[in-house]
Image: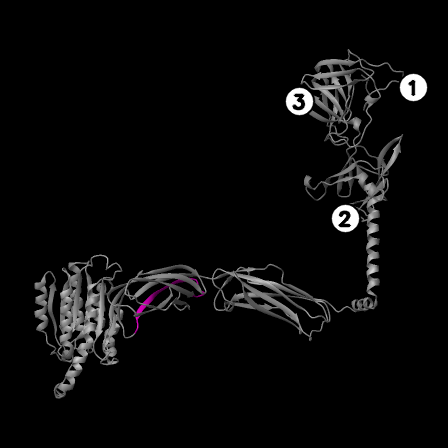
Amino acid sequence: MRITQRQMATSSEKVPEKSKMDLQRATALLPAIFILIQFSLFPCSAAATEKKLPNQDIVFLLDTSSSMRNIFGDVKKAILEYAQKAQPGDTIVLISFGEKINLRFRQKISSAQDIRLIERELASLESDQFYTYITGALDKGMEELSQLEKKDTKHQRTMILLSDGKNNPPPVVAEPIQFEDLLKRYPGLLQGSNAAFFYLSLGDHPDPDVVEWMELAKGTSFNLGKELAEMTEENRQLGFAQVFVEPVSLDLGRVAGPKATVPVSLAFFPARGDASDQQIQLSFRGAYQENPSWKTLLEITPGGVTCSRKPWTTQFVVRVDSFHEGTVVGKLELKPLPGQVLFLEPPEIPVTVTISQPEISVDLRERLQFGPIRPGAAFRETKSVFLRSNSIAEPEDIRITPSVGLPEGIKMTTSFVRQEDCLELQITVETDATLAITHSQTLDGKIAFAGARGPIKFSKDEVEIAVKIAPPHARGRLIEKFFSWLDPALLIGAAAGIVLLVGGIFLYRFIRARPMSALEGKLVLINLKDKSHDRSRLITASLNTLGKSVGRDSIVIGSAKDAGLVLPHKSVAAHHCELFVKLDKGNKRMYLQPLGKNKVIVNLQKLDGPVPLSDRDLIEVGAYTFRFENPHPYKQIVVRYLDGRMLKGTPASWDIEGDGFGLLPRDALPGSNEEIYVSFSDLKAVYFVRDFDGQIGKKIVSPATQMHGVHMLLTFHDKEKIEGYTSQAYSATSARFYFFPADQTGNTISLLVERKHLRKIDILEPAKEREPSRTGPATVPLIRTGKSA
């Protein structure tokens, strides 16, 4: 700061008034000097009051221009008081600046003698310079801090600039140091976390270049001159204090926008001075790492906090409002209110938060189908869609777009209702008097969902909607008028009569005698052309059941709906063939005949007329192949071997005095040569059965009831015992004989027993004498030619 001769002369003419102003300024600025001293004594740690503080290296940059002379003594006094409170190991450096930069002292505090040396040096200082070379002083101070850092890296380093003017280098300096040069010369010191920089402006207006440099150096500036000018002489006092804040960084984790909230706890620790009742303002600033232009909003509530005399903790809520996915990096700034000198450490807290795109689940509990809307009748119907979000979604965040072409007189409205755990979208369709319906129709459309302020991921981007309109019906109106003319009592009586009539018909059909049918056997579908054979699709048709359904002893097979057995295939004629019952020599037989010129094949032979059917015949009707099953109980045998094996089938030959017989297995096709030879010597017995599967379908009168042979108990080698009767032709010397179980309620009708394989024969009762029958002695019915036992 340069002062001309005229300015000095003018100043000397106003000494009395000037002296009064200087005294006032000195008195007002003295607390500010103490703020710096108190702050520099304590490092930035919340635990500073609980443990020994680390040593400090503090550099004072003192303006010695003549404009400082009115407060210069108070400034020197404040520096001396700081030195007196320093702890052993601290280093205090004083650099004076005007047109010259001078290192006044660099003193390490170890005893009271060091304090006296500092006091003598301060007393010799005068404010007699004509320029204010601030950049030169900053350069010298940064150099001192660098040297001190090399000596001990654990010390806290602080630099305090005290000046009432602006940077004004003397003319003798050909190339003055610029603020940019300072940033380039000491990057390590400025970027380090163990150094603090403060600018205490004692004049009316701070130097904007110094303020900007302090911001780049992450320092703090205080405009004390402006605040002093706003105070009256009676209340001119400055409160000062130091407060530490923890944590020093915040990671809010992952949140889902928009309007997500995260709880945050901050702890405050007053260090020196009285911070009670002072205010701290909090605010966020930050941007997306992926794209800084993306809009985002970070707010903290409450936005301010009142300081206390003792340590305290405050709970905050951080609100994150953004629709973009990414990571937001910013800072939480802490500032005292204007007019307060409050040193906050740290003055800003780094903040990181990862924002994920909001997701909304669309829950449709019912189809959005409205109507039918009928002519002349008022209509109003409301249906709901439930939207569940992973964040706090508001109705204004969601855009609803219906796309349904509604005619005049029908309108659709949507509205949101906040439920406990979701948003309920209510869709209402209603009509008014202008609706004119000319024909029936269904109006199909959609309702689309999208984010109103940013992208939102919906589980369904759209849902379908339909509005049904019923047609005007002249006949319906006539019927309505007709019923309006009738007496209600008459209508009730007519309705009761209809109910009784329908009930009577149903009861008659239920309890009436069922028709009988002589049809027997069943058709089993074993193949359908053009499709692979799949046993899971086999169809079995009971002919007796089909005959009862039509009340006849015959049924027609065809593709027509009135056929007894319907085969819905293009290869089958409407009435293709007929199954019927015919008596043949006193025995009931099933016959099959084609109708017209339709092709029917039985056992690979085309039919020209009616033919009798036998058990296991193959019948081809169009693309269908059936197996006719109607086994005669006396033709079915089960062969049991000594080793436990078992075969089922029909005898192809039979002679009980021979060595064996031929057996046609159960699964062999009719007419095939798949005959198995069975030796009697390998058998336990041959069982004549009613049914291969042991299911007795009808009662059969056993020959045992007509024969009275020897009553005996047979014991086989496998210890099986059977009680029963022999035939009247029984011989005690025959190799094998027929035997009829006494219990004829089972599946076995009779046995052919191999005598040598019996373990024991117990005679319970000899054969009874009977008169010969007119028809001759009873014999065992056999299948083929052979001799009786």
The coloring applied to the image is one colour
Tell us which disc is closer to us: 2 or 3. 3
In this orientation, does residue 657 appear? Answer: no
Disc 2 marks which amino acid? Lys
Give residue 46's quadrant in the image.
bottom left
Give residue 424's quadrant in the image.
bottom right
- For the residue pair 417 and 469, the one nearer the viewer reads as 417
Please determine whether, in this image, residue 644 is positioned above or below residue 375: above
Q: Position of residue 338 (x, y in %)?
A: 29, 74
Q: Which badge, 3 or 1, comes first in the chain's sequence?
A: 3
Q: Residue furthest top?
A: 733
Q: Quadrant of the N terminus?
A: bottom left
Disc 3 marks which amino acid? Gly
Q: Mark 1 and mark 2: span between their CA atoms?
A: 59 Å
Q: Which badge, 2 or 3, comes first in the chain's sequence?
A: 2
Q: Mark 2 and mark 3: span between their CA atoms?
A: 50 Å
Q: Which residue is disc 3 drawn over? A: 644
Q: Report the span colored magenta.
A: 321-337
Tell us which disc is closer to us: 3 or 1. 1
Q: Which residue is disc 2 drawn over? A: 570
Tell us which disc is closer to us: 1 or 2. 1
Element at label 2: loop
Disc 1 marks which amino acid? Arg
Quick check: 140 left or right of 504? left
Q: Which residue is disc 1 drawn over? A: 774
Q: Residues within 10 Å of mark 1 (few under 14, many from 20)?
A: few
